[in-house]
Image (cartoon, rainbow, N blue to C red):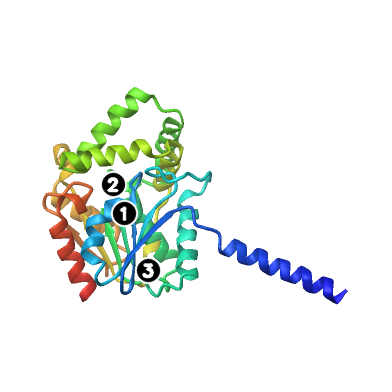
């Protein structure tokens, strides 16, 4: 009887280890040496978006570059809780690999993810850089927006992505690319990543982003935070640098220690449009 119980316990232990060792749904490319730096791309983007950033930092940091599931050819996972699932997987990855206070760098949706990671596990992460990401994307155009008022639009977006019109989708992607970066090669790359992405994942991720409001929750963040904003992609709509700066400061009002800097000419992909400026801000922040 005792031997049978021991065998059962061993089996349970084996299964527990197998669950813990399960590969994450995101792709990880590791390079460099030194303290850990985790780089998270935005919606539909490949980890390749950080290539120049890794080249800049890999002499001083071990860079862990992610590509999230369903984006840019990375296999999708079916989930109704995409953001929270990925967040928890990243936390498990950090714990299992015993990364000590890794620096977090996130772009767009990746910037939101960096904030969500700090909110969920404030003791686990080190300095955090948010590259054109926000606690609540739903309030960009209307500061009084709430999750409830945004939900109809979020529902509509998710339904449209579930059954896209191919011709309309390609036209929309081309227009989207032009507003995201300046150089034609970068625009082409951004569009290609989008077309390699799983549309259902894109729709689900954006649906959750619209309905996730961390503006109050960021008060729990203990790590120093640098926020880098961009506005040039929307200047034709009357958006100015001052408007963008004030919008960012309002969204981070509950985290007054956050440093907010806004680029002069960069569109959404700041790492492509103003890499020298971005690295200068990050270097000063990381060294301080």
Number of the label disc, if any, that sits on residue 186:
none
Residue 122, how many percent across, how many down? 42, 70
In the rendered image of this protein, does residue 244 appear above or below residue 157? below
Corner quadrant of residue 57: bottom left
> What's the CA distance linking mark 2 and mark 1?
9 Å
How many marks on residues?
3
The mark lying in front, picked from 3 and 2, is 3
The outermost residue toward the left is: 264
Within 10 Å of disc 2 (Cα), the crowding (few <14, some 14-19, many 20+) is some
Within 10 Å of disc 3 (Cα), the crowding (few <14, some 14-19, many 20+) is many
Please report the residue visible at 38 percent of the width from the left and 70 percent of the height from the top: 125
Which residue is under mark 1?
134
> What's the CA distance linking mark 3 and mark 2?
21 Å
Image quarter where the C terminus lies is bottom left
The secondary structure type at the circle numbered 2 is: loop
The mark lying in front, picked from 2 and 1, is 1
The secondary structure type at the circle numbered 3 is: loop
Q: Can residue 135 be seen in this view?
A: no
Q: Are marks 2 and 1 in contact (CB under 8 Å)?
A: yes
> What's the CA distance linking mark 3 and mark 1?
14 Å
The outermost residue toward the right is: 1
**Of pointers 2 and 1, the one earlier in the residue sequence:** 1
In the rendered image of this protein, does residue 111 appear above or below residue 206? below
Which residue is under mark 3?
221
The front one of 135 and 11 is 11
Which residue is under mark 2?
140
Please report the residue visible at 40 percent of the width from the left and 75 percent of the height from the top: 100
**Of pointers 3 and 1, the one earlier in the residue sequence:** 1
């Amino acid at each position: 009887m005792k031997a049978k119980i021991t065998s059962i316990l061993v089996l349970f232990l084996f299964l527990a280890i197998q669950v813990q060792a399960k590969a994450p749904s995101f792709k990880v490319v590791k390079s460099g040496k030194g303290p850990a730096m985790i780089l998270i791309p935005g919606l539909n983007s490949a980890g390749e978006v950080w290539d120049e950033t890794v080249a800049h930092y890999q002499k001083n940091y071990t860079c862990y570059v992610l590509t999230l599931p369903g984006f840019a050819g990375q296999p999708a996972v079916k989930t109704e809780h995409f953001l929270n699932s990925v967040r928890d997987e990243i936390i498990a990855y950090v714990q299992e690999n015993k990364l000590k206070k890794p620096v977090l760098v996130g772009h767009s949706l990746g910037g939101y993810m960096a904030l969500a990671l700090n909110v969920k596990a404030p003791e686990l992460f080190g300095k955090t850089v948010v590259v054109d990401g926000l606690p609540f994307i739903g309030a960009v155009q209307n500061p009084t927006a709430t999750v409830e008022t945004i939900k109809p639009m979020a529902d509509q977006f998710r339904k449209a992505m579930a059954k896209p019109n191919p011709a309309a989708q390609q036209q929309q992607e081309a227009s989207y690319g032009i507003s995201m970066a300046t150089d034609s090669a970068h625009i082409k790359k951004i569009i290609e990543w989008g077309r390699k992405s799983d549309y259902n994942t894109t729709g689900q991720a954006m649906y959750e982003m619209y309905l996730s409001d961390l503006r109050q929750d960021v008060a729990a963040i203990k790590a120093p935070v640098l926020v880098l904003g961009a506005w040039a992609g929307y200047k034709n709509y009357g958006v100015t640098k001052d408007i963008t700066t004030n919008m960012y400061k309002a969204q981070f009002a509950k985290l007054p220690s956050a440093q907010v800097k806004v680029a002069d000419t960069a569109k959404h992909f700041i790492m492509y449009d103003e890499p020298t400026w971005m690295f200068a801000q990050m270097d000063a922040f990381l060294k301080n």
